[in-house]
Image (tube, rainbow, N blue to C red):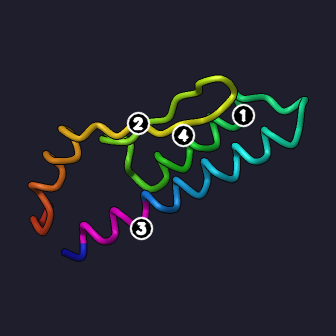
Amino acid sequence: MEVRQTRQEKLRVVEEEVDEQNQYMAGHARAHVEVAQRKVRERIEQLKLSGWLSERVDSWVTLLDEDRTALAEEAKLDGCSMY
């Protein structure tokens, strides 16, 4: 249960980053969408969610894509010790 909750908290952090970048893009005409996308990707990698979460850009808006199959596989390992 704790691992699932932590994963959801990390997802919320990434969603907040996406919202922040999209708001910035909307308010700054000269902003580069590639920079916003890179910042979101770096946050995903920092939080170790890249196995099931990715970013994409559609019409200057950064969106998140969840791979439900990969997430389900990762969830099977919840609580398993890797040591």
Look at the numbered discs 4 and 3 and tell me whether their residues touch, using CB distance below 8 Å: no
Residue indicated by mark 3: 9
Q: CA distance from mark 1 to mark 4?
A: 10 Å
As shown in the figure, which amino acid type bears the numbered disc 2?
Asp
As shown in the figure, which amino acid type bears the numbered disc 1?
Val
Q: Residues within 10 Å of mark 1 (few under 14, many from 20)?
A: few
Look at the numbered discs 2 and 4 and tell me whether their residues touch, using CB distance below 8 Å: no
Q: Foreground mark, 4 or 3?
A: 3
As shown in the figure, which amino acid type bears the numbered disc 3?
Glu
In percent of width and height, residue 19 lies at 64, 51
Residue indicated by mark 1: 35
Residue indicated by mark 2: 65
Looking at the image, is 69 positioned above or below residue 72? above
Look at the numbered discs 1 and 4 and tell me whether their residues touch, using CB distance below 8 Å: no
State which region is magenta. Answer: 3-10
Helix or strand or loop: what does disc 4 sit on?
A: helix
Picture residue at 66% right of the left edge, 23% below the top: 59
Q: Earlier in the sequence, mark 3 or mark 2?
A: 3
In percent of width and height, residue 62 lies at 60, 35
Looking at the image, is 14 positioned above or below residue 33? below
Q: CA distance from mark 3 to mark 2?
A: 17 Å
As shown in the figure, which amino acid type bears the numbered disc 4?
Arg
- Most extreme residue toward the bottom, as rendered? 2
Q: CA distance from mark 1 to mark 2?
A: 18 Å
- Quarter of the C terminus within the rendering: bottom left
